[in-house]
Amino acid sequence: MDTRTDEEIVKMVQSGDSESFGVLIEKYEGKIKRYARKFISSIEDIQDVVQEIFIKTYSNIQSFDLDKRFSPWVYRIAHNEIINTLRKREKLPMLFFDPDTVFPHPISHEKTDSLAKDEETKKSLDKCFEKLSPKYREPLVLYYLEEMDYKAISDVLQIPVPTVGIRLKRGKEILKSLCDNIDIDYEK
Amino acid sequence: MKNEKQKNSIKEQILDKIKKGEFKMHPKFYFFLKAIVVTIIVIILIVIIVFLISFIVFSSENNGAQFLIGSGFKGILSAIYLLPWIFVLIVLIAIILIEKLIKRYKFTYKRPLIYSLLFIVIFGAVCGLIIHKTFLHQGVSCLINDFFYGGPRSTNLPDTHEGRIYKINENEIEIMDLNGQILDAIFPSESFKLKDREFERGDKIIFTGLRKDSVINISSYRKLNCGCGGCVLDELEK
């Protein structure tokens, strides 16, 4: 079991120890695959995307600032790669500016008042997330499944922290209505 | 091939590719150079924005657009027509490009975009106004009086006229408009202080008012900058 921190491993890779990059792949392969699976359905495509993510991580590793956390940085690369793949395949619209990111919003932190509620959202994510647009799906996945905080999500998606709160809130509402509709369909 | 790919783990495949040199780690210098290029592009775009904003102010002062803004609804429409829209569009594109280039940096994306947008606009406007005060455009317009400094004029605007003072009479002035036509401009009240010799022959003037044949009842006016040629009457003497 490697006890070094991600940042310490990155430092080794930056200084030319490419074998240490294998440790980073081991640590993140599962997480990145799980993340990609929430947006891409084909197993082959996921394999290709994940490989491309690690290739880009390695190519750009010298630009990583060792004073920052590695995890949001690698997820940022994953985000870009997944969005590019979705754009190519699903013709995802290209937005110059998202209205959510233009104007200031009060920070609306998700109320994690009960664990049951979180579990409920996690279950809903598994059941109904396919119909949710990537714009809302991504923060939900990062928050509930990858267990990132608002600041880290803000760094991954490169959006203001209050926007993360807005998207989580709206995402949960949309998800709930989507799940309700599915339940109604099942009942029928 | 497909089976082989599936057999090997991603880790093995990537480390194998690194060993074979199929892809390489970009050196630190590459990112430094990239940041320098982005910075230079942003600086160039800011210079373009500042220059064009100062030009837009200069142009709107010279063609009377600034004056027309305060002349009622029709005046506002005329001022909109007189704005050098192509340059306004270039300014907007430059602002969007800057936003695109800097939005990946923490100082931009951590705050709502409106803040960085406002900062660029306010910075551009303040610097543009300072440049405008330096008479840079006045000087440059004398050197190159082409399309850039020509701009739209008020010839086609309803109830808006531009010309040079041809003759000053007791209660009216004769104005030669941009088409070379002599118009009789009548002032409705004495408040315009015609007698105080506010006007000189050759002065450039923009005015609003209803026209009937060659007679115009002036409702508002402003003297314009005569430009690098000065308020000379050479053209009028012909």
Image (tube, rainbow, N blue to C red):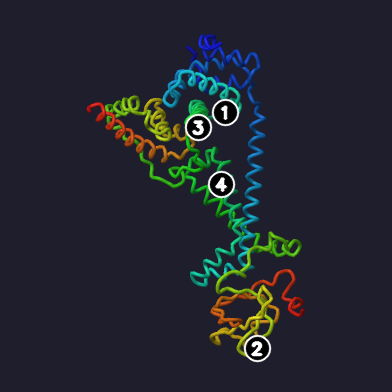
Chain designation of label 2: B
Chain designation of label 1: A
Where's residue B161, x and y in %? 60, 74
Residue B93 sits above or below residue A46 on the image: below
Quarter of the view holding residue A172: top left
Asked if disc 2 and disc 4 are in contact, CB closer than 8 Å, the reply is no
In the picture provided, is B33 more to the left or to the right than B116?
A: right
Q: Disc 2 marks which residue?
A: B169
Q: Disc 4 marks which residue?
A: B96
Q: Nearer the viewer, residue A174 or B166?
A: B166
- Mark 1 is on which residue type? Phe
- Alpha-carbon span between mark 1 and mark 4: 27 Å
Residue A91 visible here: yes
Q: Mark 2 or 1, which is nearer the eye?
A: 2
- Alpha-carbon span between mark 2 and mark 1: 78 Å
Secondary structure beneath label 4? helix
Residue A64, disc: 1
Q: Exactly how many numbered labels are in the figure?
A: 4
Q: Are marks 2 and 1 on the same chain?
A: no
- Mark 3 is on which residue type? Arg
Q: Mark 1 or 3, which is nearer the eye?
A: 3
- Mark 2 is on which residue type? Asn
Q: Are marks 1 and 4 on the same chain?
A: no
Residue A87, disc: 3
Q: Nearer the viewer, residue A10 or B133?
A: B133
